[in-house]
Amino acid sequence: MKNNKTVHKQKKIKKQRIKDFTRSSLEKKISRQSAELKNKKGQLKEGADREKSAEEQIYIQTKAMEFTLDAIFIIDAIKPDFPIIYVNPSFLRITGYSKKDVLGKGYFLLNGFDVNLSNPEEIKKNLLQGKSFHGEILKYKRNGEKYWTLLRIAPVRDNEGVITHYVGIKTDTTLMKQRESEINLQREELLHVTRVGKLAEFVSSLAHEISQPLAAILSYAEAIQRLFKGREPQLQEIIQNIINDDVRASEVIQRLRELLKKNKPAFKLLNINDLIKDTTALMLAHVISKNKIINFELDSKLPVILGDRVQLQQVLLNLISNSLEAMGERPESRDLLIKSFLMNTKTIMVQVKDSGCGIPPENIKKLFSHFFTSKPDGLGMGLSISRSIVEAHGGHLEAENNVDCGSTFSFSLPVAIKENI
């Protein structure tokens, strides 16, 4: 009986130990599985965070490419025709193309519209050799407009080093080129103005030197005239012609010196017809050398104006010079007409009408703009300065093409009123 109790007790202890062991093993297993699950959960969270971070980076990179001012494009390097597989909005804005015009199309089909057709060949050669390209290129937009672009193309390689794509960036440098051109033009203009200033000083000095022998010639001619007074009528006539030509030459020299003087504007009462005659006298030799003729239709009853003589002469000289150049392009045109008339009781009109080649219609609106010129060696300042002078005198300068041929430049000047006299 006692042995049975002992056996029973031992069995009970053994069952309890088995039970405890099983519970302990199960708890350990559950703990281990819980740890593994927690670890896996951490790994999953870490992977999700990395994926989220990668997605955010891709999103930021995509947005950066979409919003950058530079044109970005991607080329498939595997296919032989180098098709474009991506362009950002700036590429479309700069080139003028739409997505359907470029996506899937060979890159060099678009580059076929380069101004310099050697550029696509150079780029293609670099790409075929797996090299980058960097250079400034003059290109055409879709509408035919020219633009400058700084182009950079670089290869993209996979893990094995094989080139799979090319990424290109284009920066529009048109505005910088235009500003650079304007700066160069202004620099050239300043150099030209400096040269003209030096030339003016030389001419003024030369005019002073010439006036002295002219005065001597006049003195000798007058002395001979006195010696032969009442005798030798033919000789008297020759001497008088010498005196007249000497006086006329002296007047031309004097007007030239006045024109070259650097004086402040001096507004005085002027007869516009006298001003026209004096100015054309300065250009008479130039007109004759070009085999042209200046005709006049001057109203003899015009009232006086208030203006600066030298400045208004500058306007007339410029208009006449331009007309003679325009007529030079048509050898058959010889006549240049200068008119003056009273447009109304308060305004005098002066017109310089030539029979030259005329003004291209597209140039008329920008004719008086700074730096605009249709001449290969022109600065584009003459007409702009002339308009400023006329407007400073209270008038207006304009141009139009004639019905038959040539063009007419007209400027108005106000009649001098009593309050200003």
Image: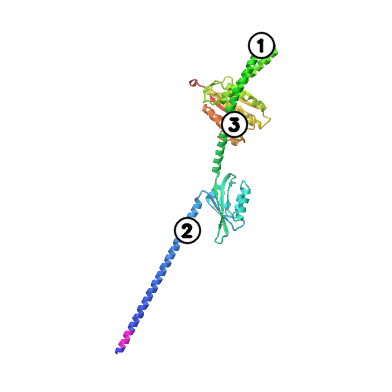
**Scheme of image coloration:** rainbow
Q: What residue type is labelled 1?
A: Leu
Q: Which amino acid does label 2 sit on?
A: Glu
Q: What element carries label 1?
A: helix
Residue that label 3 marks: 400
Q: Where is residue 362 in the image (x, y as percent from the top left)?
A: 59, 37
Judged from the image, the secondary structure of the residue bearing numbered disc 2 is helix
Task: Give the spatial CA distance, label 3 vs label 1.
Answer: 58 Å
* Residue range highlighted in magenta: 4-10
Q: Nearer the viewer, residue 391 or 44?
A: 44
Which one is in front, 353 or 137?
137
Residue 146 magenta:
no
The one of 211 and 300 positioned closer to us in this rendering:
211
Q: Is the magenta stretch mostly helix, strand or loop?
A: helix
Of labels 3 and 1, earlier in sequence is 1
Q: How far apart are marks 2 and 1 (CA)?
A: 113 Å
Secondary structure of residue under mark 3: strand
Residue at the outermost left position: 2
C-alpha separation, residue under disc 3 versus residue under disc 2: 65 Å
Which residue, given by chain and number where applicable, does mark 1 sit on?
227
Instruction: State the residue position of label 2.
Output: 55
